[in-house]
Amino acid sequence: MKFSYSKLNVFLTCPLQYKFKYIDKDKIEETTDAYSTYLGRGVHLALEKLYENKHKDLEWLEIMWIKICNDQIKEANQKSPEIFKDKNTQNMFRNQGRKILRVFYESNQDQFQHPQHETLALEQKFSTQLKEFTLTGIIDKVEKVGSDIFVVDYKTGAPPPQKDVDNNLQLSFYAVACRKTGLALSNIYFCMHHVKQNVKIYTKRSVDDVKKLYDILAEVHDKIINNSFEPTPSKSACRFCGFKQYCPVYQKEIENEQS
């Protein structure tokens, strides 16, 4: 069975949401695109462009953001026009992205010309095996500083506690991909870079972490095979779910509130 981190995370968040999204996808329509989705996607793309040619300056980056921003708004208007339905929201989107990128550039520009700081890969796709499972994904950035390798994942949300990063399964996906290329986990640091706050949270991965990931995948696989898709509602999960109109638990909750 093939897993991406996002696919696994959907199941761990709510198995019924997984069924709606991946098994019943030809029968029902998802409505999940949101402001934050387009902001994250746009910032990722701008940083990729920046690191493709690290000698660009801040003015170039801001001009690039205007183009990316306009493209994101255009795409959203075609798919989910309610997201950027007024000029104020569009201007907020432009200004928020520009602020994030300015902070990032000003905080990290010293790395661009550092002789020991080398970008090895950007938006690196991978497809690799963990026993019977195929793991797929995209790593935002891989860089080398001296003899150390840093695998970086950009985030536009609020920084989580260190323990959440230490247990993050997305970084364990990356660890499997790195091991398959022959890199030793002892030489790799995994970093979640929260670009809004310019906060970098570092962690390591071990063989035990890879085994833990495998056990979780095996458990999820068994539940999928056995058609076990019990909903696990929560305020945070249901708020961003694109299948609320199909979920009996959510609809029951609405009925209870109305009554």
Image (spheres, rainbow, N blue to C red):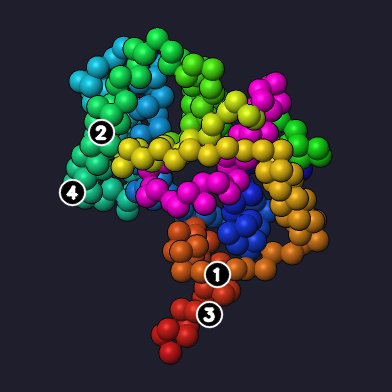
* Residue in front for this viewpoint, 221 or 66: 221
Could you tell me which residue is drawn at 28 percent across and 37 percent down?
Answer: 100
Rounded to the nearest angstrom, the CA distance separating label 3 from label 4 is 35 Å
Could you tell me which residue is drawn at 68 percent across and 53 percent down?
Answer: 23
Assign a secondary structure to mark 2: helix
Rounded to the nearest angstrom, the CA distance separating label 2 from label 3 is 45 Å
Earlier in the chain: of badge 3 and badge 4, it is: 4
Per the image, is 170 magenta?
yes
Residue type at the position of mark 3: Lys
**Residue 214 appears at what percent x and percent y?**
74, 45
Residue type at the position of mark 2: Val
Specify whether 99 is left or right of 243.
left
Looking at the rendered structure, which numbered label has been put on residue 88? 4
Span colored in magenta: 155-184
Rounded to the nearest angstrom, the CA distance separating label 3 from label 1 is 11 Å
- Asked if the residue under mark 2 is in contact with the one under mark 1, i.e. CB atoms within 8 Å, the reply is no
Q: Which residue is mark 2?
A: 103
Q: Nearer the viewer, mark 1 or mark 2?
A: 2
Looking at the rendered structure, which numbered label has been put on residue 233? 1
Mark 4 surroundings: few (<14), some (14-19) or many (≥20) residues within 10 A: few
Rounded to the nearest angstrom, the CA distance separating label 4 from label 2 is 22 Å
* Residue in front for this viewpoint, 20 or 45: 45
**Residue 10 appears at what percent x and percent y?**
59, 54
Residue type at the position of mark 1: Pro
